[in-house]
Amino acid sequence: MNAGPIDPRYDVRISGMEEWEILVPQGLSVVVDPLLYRVGQFFLEGRAAGPDRWSVIAADLGALATFFDLIVLHDKLPAFNYPDTFDTEEMNYRDGLGSAMNADGEQTLVHVDVALDLYERTKTAALEQIKDRMAHGPFVPGGVADQILRTLHGMRYQWQPALEYLDPQLPDERDKQLARFLVGHLVFTGYAQQIGAPHVVSACRSRVIGAIGVGAANRRAATEAEVFAELARRCRTGGDGWRDEELPWTPSFLPYLVETLDGARGGPEALLRRAKDLREQKAVARYRTLRAELAAEDADRSERARRALAEAADAVAAELDSTRDRLELLRPIVIEVLPKALGAGLGAMGGLIVAGPPGAVGGAIVGTASEQAFKMVNERLWGWSIDRLPFRSARKLLARSVRAEREIGLELGPKLERIWERRGA
């Protein structure tokens, strides 16, 4: 199915445009922010991998909660060229993330290699999008920029995609760092767009991405509600094919997992094993099905799943002998642009629209989409879709904190740190 040899570091190779479609049928139905994976890796590797790493984990416990939720909700998770983003030291690859997630013999993490020409095509589209943004002023608001740079330093972010023709236009090294980060982020946005899969971002990163998307002047905690309110407003006035949904109460499985391990001698690997075991719980299995249906292009099917989620979440809490107050840390927010939003513009310009399944909001758009049609999206939510790339959908699965980050840290931080320190115990 995959043309060309597969690098032994990888499990799947995407070597042609048509092969983006093979991922979802294989159960690889999300695109995960590599910074979210990085927090998970730091935790699973434990203190022995570096005592200074706890400060990075503690600074984003929401990312760790999302990481474990992804493990519970998905049998398999794709990591796209993770060696190019992290763990490349003088070209000596160390599969820290895969070794930790797959240590029990189950292939939870699947390494995906995107062929160079497909990566370059996506990256070029990202560079063009940043170039367009630069023409209209600062491409990242000041307060948001500071937070991004602090995060990249703590995460030891090693991916330095060349800025090529943008480099001379960014004489300041700070701006170059921000541009490289945005190129990386937009590459993953482009992958999600071509696959038609949700792009999953942690709560901390959701605020940043949301603020960049709407051009917010800063990203103080006090403005979080305003950022998400503006995202919702732009979607609701965007016409057919735009959707935004703040999901009903959603269980975060990390508090339960920590509670069941508290007092035991198990380390991060024991917490991981318990997360995988949760998949077999009857109520959790139903909840997994409903969460998957949220991404359906069929609006009626997606809405039915959304209405059933609160009841399913209550059933999960009851089966785990817990409560909403204990389990609700994060509130997922699904913001998406489906093909129908672009249909009129593309039709007027000769774009090719292929009908989707009966009742679907829209079908897949194949070939290179018109830049003019995508401007409608990017003027409202910058970075949600990528010009010059095939489009199936533009979905971000964001999250906001239900509890204050400080509260989450006080409640879970000390217990998680003890578990982290017991790696291999």
Image (cartoon, rainbow, N blue to C red):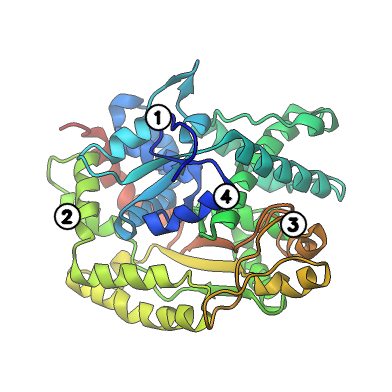
Name the residue that disc number 2 marks: 260
* Percent coordinates x, y for residue 240 in the rendering: 68, 79
Element carrying mark 4: helix
Q: Amino acid at mark 1?
A: Arg
N-terminal-most mark, 3 or 1: 1
Q: Classify 204 as above or below 335.
A: above
In the rendered structure, are the residues bearing label 1 and label 2 in contact, judged by CB atoms less than 8 Å apart?
no
Element carrying mark 2: helix
Tag in front: 1 or 2: 1
Tag in front: 3 or 1: 1
Tag in front: 4 or 2: 4
In the rendered structure, are the residues bearing label 4 and label 3 in contact, judged by CB atoms less than 8 Å apart?
no
Name the residue that disc number 1 marks: 9
- Whether residue 156 is visible, yes or no, is no
Residues under labels 3 and 2: Cα distance? 43 Å
N-terminal-most mark, 1 or 4: 1
Front in this rendered view, residue 280 or 29: 29
N-terminal-most mark, 4 or 2: 4
Name the residue that disc number 4 marks: 191
Residues under labels 3 and 1: Cα distance? 39 Å
Q: How many marks?
A: 4
Element carrying mark 3: loop
Name the residue that disc number 3 marks: 215
- Whether residue 222 is visible, yes or no, is yes
Which image quarter: residue 311? bottom left
* Percent coordinates x, y for residue 260 in the rendering: 17, 55
Residue positioned 42% across, 76% down in the render? 248
Residue most extreme to the right: 135
Front in this rendered view, residue 192 or 318: 192
Q: Classify 294 as above or below 420.
A: below
